[in-house]
Amino acid sequence: MDVNHINAFITGLIEVSGMLGLGNLTRTSLGARKQLKTQNEVNIIIGLVGDIKGNVVLSMQEKTAMNIASKMMGGLPVSEFDLMPKSALCELSNMVSGRSVSELEKMGVLTNITPPTLVHGHNLISLISQVETLVIEFSAEEGRLELNIATED
Amino acid sequence: MELSTTIAPFVRASTNIFREMLDVSIHKGQVEAEGESFLSQGFTVMVGLTGGWEGWFFLDMSQETAIKMASLMVGEDYSSVEEEEVLLAGAEIANIICGNAITDINNIHSGLNIRLTPPSIFAGDNMSMFNVRLNACSVLLQSDIGNVKINVVMKEAK
């Protein structure tokens, strides 16, 4: 796992969130994922194939997801996590991955991405790719976000 | 691209792999069209597809079925999906099924050049999978170890 590749995703998320007007997204921590369980109900997964092969998962709690969706829809209140906020979040991760991929392309790393899939559920256990997963935590006014990156180089 | 025909190679591969690797026979399959969203039975392995067609392949089953499947594969008894081997066994099966099916598809449609991402596994309660603006086609396979649903979401890449 190359640190430049990781940076491409961090840049992607920060730039897109700034563009969408999410409040003060800052990176809080970075580390290896230690457990299979996750407290986050909302996980958006995007697959990568090419020079980098793996999966990237943007994960957060339902409350955060609704706050972000509301911000993206111009402050429209979101009280239920239905199709509208789900599709807003898929769009968000599409933009993040698109941005990240073009960032990677500048470094000469060519990668194809799959469309995003949003996994929503309770008491989730997840195993992303089958390699060690890097977890980068962010905090914003809307809540905490986690970027899980699991790639085989 | 007609989804109900693209799912055929996946059904074929699943039936073969279940018989050859696990000695589990599939009795019956039922095709269903599903919309943007579908509910999981509790344990889902997903493999991403990129290339001429892009999307996802899901192998979905109950947690009990996943545990039984892992036991058959590894030859050990498991009690919960929290054991990593159960997740890995599911991932391996999905990877093999998907690999076989994609080889078929790439052979039939030369130039598509579909490639797979490594599998990811999710397990939990009331799980739903949402694919924005994509429709899923699923086949519910009835087997000796329980119902296994395969789900294919694909579109032609721009």
Image: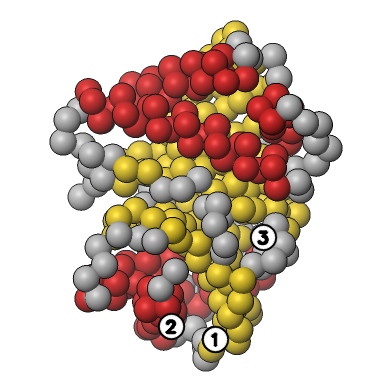
Q: Secondary structure at mark 1?
A: strand
| Side of A10 relative to B79 (left or right) | left
The residues tagged by marks 2 and 1 sit, at their Cα atoms, a distance apart of 9 Å
The residue depicted at 54 percent of the width and 57 percent of the height is A131
Which residue is denoted by mark 2 in the rendering? A14
Mark 2 or 1, nearer chain start = 2
Q: Residues within 10 Å of mark 1 (few under 14, many from 20)?
A: some
Circle 1: residue type: Arg
Q: Quadrant of residue A63?
A: bottom right
Q: Chain of mark 1?
A: A
Q: Which mark is residue A41?
A: 3
Circle 3: residue type: Glu
Q: Tell which residue pokes out farthest to the top in this image.
A: B27
| Side of B121 relative to B10 (left or right) | right
Q: Secondary structure at mark 2?
A: helix
Circle 2: residue type: Ile
Is label 3 in contact with label 2 (beta carbons under 8 Å)? no
Q: Is residue A109 visible?
A: yes
Q: Tell which residue pokes out farthest to the front in this image.
A: B75
Q: Nearer the viewer, residue A65 or A3?
A: A3
Q: Nearer the viewer, residue B151 or A62?
A: B151
Q: Nearer the viewer, mark 2 or mark 1?
A: 1
The quarter in which the N terminus of chain B is drawn is top left
Is label 2 in contact with label 1 (beta carbons under 8 Å)? yes
The residue depicted at 34 percent of the width and 53 percent of the height is A49
Q: Residues within 10 Å of mark 3 (few under 14, many from 20)?
A: many
The residues tagged by marks 3 and 2 sit, at their Cα atoms, a distance apart of 22 Å
Mark 1 or 3, nearer chain start = 1
Q: How is the image coloured?
A: secondary structure
